[in-house]
Image (cartoon, rainbow, N blue to C red):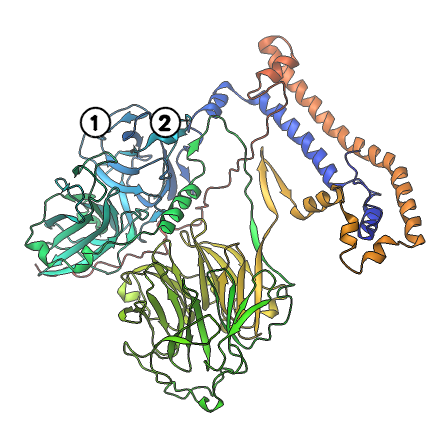
Amino acid sequence: MDGWLPAAPRNDTRFHRTTSTDINTPSPGMMGASVLLGLLMAFVLQGHCTESPSSRRLQEGDCASRTKPPLLFNSHNFSMDLRMPGVSPSNSDTYLCMAFPVPTNQDSYIVDFIPHASMNTVHHMILFGCQSPSSASSSWDCGGALGTCKDDPSIMYAWARNAPPTKLPKDVGFRVGKGSGMSYFVLQVHYGDVSAFRDHHRDCSGLTLRMTSKPQPFVAGIYLLMSVDTVIPPGKTVTNADVACDYASYPIYPFAFRTHTHRLGKVVSGYRIRNGKWTLIGRQSPQLPQAFYPVNTELSVQYGDTVAARCVFTGEGRTSETVIGGTSDDEMCNFYMMYYMDRRHAVPFMSCMESGSREQFRHIPAEANVPIAVSPDQMSSMMHMGHAADDSVLLDKRRGGQGADQDYHLEQVTDWPEGNLQLGQVSGLALDSDSNLVIFHRGDHHWDLDSFDGRARYQHRSLGPIQQSAILVVDPAKGRILKASGRNMFYLPHGITADRDNNYWVTDVALHQVLKVSSDGRDRTLLALGEAFTPGSDSSHFCQPTDVAIDPHTGNVFVSDGYCNARILKFSADGKYLSQWGAGSLDRRQRARFQIPHSLAFLSDRREVCVADRENGRIQCFIADTGEFVKEIKKEEFGGKVFAISYSPAGDGLIYAVNGDSPYHSAPLRGFVINYTSREILDTFSPKRKQDFKMPHDLVGGPDGSVFVGDAGSEEVFKFSAEKSHRSVKKAGIQVQELEEVEAFIQTRVKPQRNTSHVAAAGPEKQTVDKPSLPVVQEEKKTVKAGRENGAMAAVIITLLLLPLLLVVIIGVFVCWRRNSKAVGGLNLGNFFASHRGYTRQGFDQLSTEGSDQERNMEDSSDSDNEEYSAPPLPPQPAS
């Protein structure tokens, strides 16, 4: 009787109606399970018959199944996996290397590096290119005299501290193969602390290389500046390691940089010096993910220039001198500069290890001496990112529980809020330190065509300020108002955020001001930036400022200004002007100024500020400390407009965004969930009735994954929560669609109903439940009787359905017997199952549900397509 659902409890009329319908037919879920079971048994039998000893060894092998042969996507593009072969180092600070032949005898170009490693296991990885590796072994100890290569190796890539993937600019690639002098890749992995291997894990960390055989106009290379003689005294607060060399080759064009030290490094900076002027190439904390970050300034390094780098260390906490060395207790000072140059003069690797003179470094910019603070939150987020980076890095011999991927989709919570919030135009949303929702709205004021004159001066001052409470604090679960403030303070509210002390920072486009307001209900203005009702473009005036972001660690204030000015301004916590910048681009000739920087998000785990550039339909991110451009996210799905953004550090980082009404309504109004690292759109969301979105103006993401959207057009706030969606799970080659709603329904039906009297006592439904009418009781009896009469019929149907499956199983057994009888002389079912890998007398092992669809599809990708960088044509070479 497993195929039947039990009748509902007698007193629950909701289940009467459903059960009376379903009890007449066999359960679809159970019938499907029976069919699936039969198919899986047939598959297991067939797989056992055809599995060869070599394939069984492959399953038992360490990382062989993870290292795929070169995979061809089209006539030009292919990928290659470089993985360690299931190693288990026993000593800390072990350096292991593995060689891989370049998979073509023609010139090829690497355009994408995808790491597969975690800082919990791997200290760092370096990819070398060379002609002859030092060993032909599957892996070898390359930390000693044997080294990596017999000839001079070239560094092509380096990874540490959970750095994200690196893509090269369009038309740029690392050349390998026939004419490059690189016939082998050598992957070096440094295992610092091997405590992770105490339970006999085996590691298959490594890289995936995306490659193309199509010639690239520009060839990439690495310039490494490295200190070799720095000594850090114990207890000394600051020790500088300076490196500088004169450049004496063809012009190079840096487009990315990477810093590397061990635990004592605070900041690493790299510069080009030309005619005595220092130009920053890159600056970063080496305690953050050691990725290749984009160079903000378009520059070249030419013959006669000097390249220089400084690493700032501290000896605090050490009791003995620390020197430059290869162990994790030693230190390193490395500044990597990734560049491209004309393919005719390409040099794949250059290095500098000369100590800079004290006189020369007297003129280094002061920023090079300022440590970049890394908060515990950033470290925690970075560790989490490492866990999420590649869950297949460590292969456990035990191969315990299998986790199925869960897909979630944001759906509107239609019964939120429970009451009417009585809002005006909703302009801004924020979360306070208690994760309560803060709503900023315009009450009975509206922004219309007559609100401002041609000089952006507000025309309705005579109306006075908004008399209603413009700031509401709302319970995010139920939507109940917890407190209200902001009466008679604002004219046209726009953006809002809350600092760590729960003060509100708001912008008012009519006042042209940024205000810091208390949240204690006293409606006090604690700080005012800008002059009331006076637009301007200097450092003490704004022109219709739109939003505010707060650095929770330093208290620095970032302002997007705004409808008239196209800039981001930075202030200290007490309102002192610090700096400002405009739109960013890696190619100045393609740089487009902001067109209404409308919304800001501070990425505390990355120390970045992202901007919703509304009319350009893009999101741009900048390093918060320097204003250096990091990346741009621009999607056709935005429809040309991005109104607001919010950020969550979950996983690789999530950006929530809402678009605006696009020209000719080419894109629907909706929200987006975007992976910060890959810039992939993970989800879109909108109200149940799509027409309810009229002008989504701001949004904020909650700690539980819910998202709130404030709509200025409909004067509402919408709540969206993450709901588990249908997911596709591949099991032994059979794709099964699991319907979550059906599962939940069946679980509800079979779960015993407890304390029904308690439920009945909760409300007026008690009389209806406790005193069912006579027709209902009679209907119940008929239902049970009908169920009994149809039970036999259902059993017959299930039996008929299983007969073909039984026939398939018998045929499978017969085929196995025919094949095995030639080798062993007959069929022995005991030996048959006992010889099957993983069989125990306690039952069958669970079937693995590892998916095979995790690889990114490259069939339609270009040879070196990349949104983040774009290599400009080489400028005319000046006469030297």
Q: Is residue 592 visible?
A: yes
Would residue 518 be found to the left or right of residue 370 on screen? right
51 is higher (above) or lower (below) than 106: above
Pointer 1 local density, CA inside 10 Å: few below 14, some 14–19, many at least 20: few
The answer to whether the residues at label 1 and label 2 have Cβ atoms under 8 Å apart is no
- Secondary structure, mark 2, is loop
Residue at point 19% right, 29% down? 150
Q: Is residue 180 visible?
A: no
429 is higher (above) or lower (below) than 702: below
Q: Earlier in the sequence, mark 1 or mark 2?
A: 2
Residue pointed to by mark 2: 87
The residue nearer to you, when weighing 775 against 184, is: 775
Q: Position of residue 136 (x, y in %)?
A: 28, 24
On-image quarter of the C terminus: bottom left
Residue at point 76% right, 42% down? 752
Toward the bottom, the furthest residue is: 462
Which mark is drawn over residue 494?
none
Give the residue type at disc 1. Answer: Gly
Q: Quadrant of residue 507?
A: bottom left
Residue pointed to by mark 1: 144
Would residue 702 be found to the left or right of residue 689 on screen? left
Q: Position of residue 606 (x, y in %)?
A: 35, 54
- Secondary structure, mark 1, is loop
Q: Position of residue 580 (x, y in %)?
A: 28, 69
Give the residue type at disc 2. Answer: Val
Would residue 286 be found to the left or right of residue 659 on screen? left
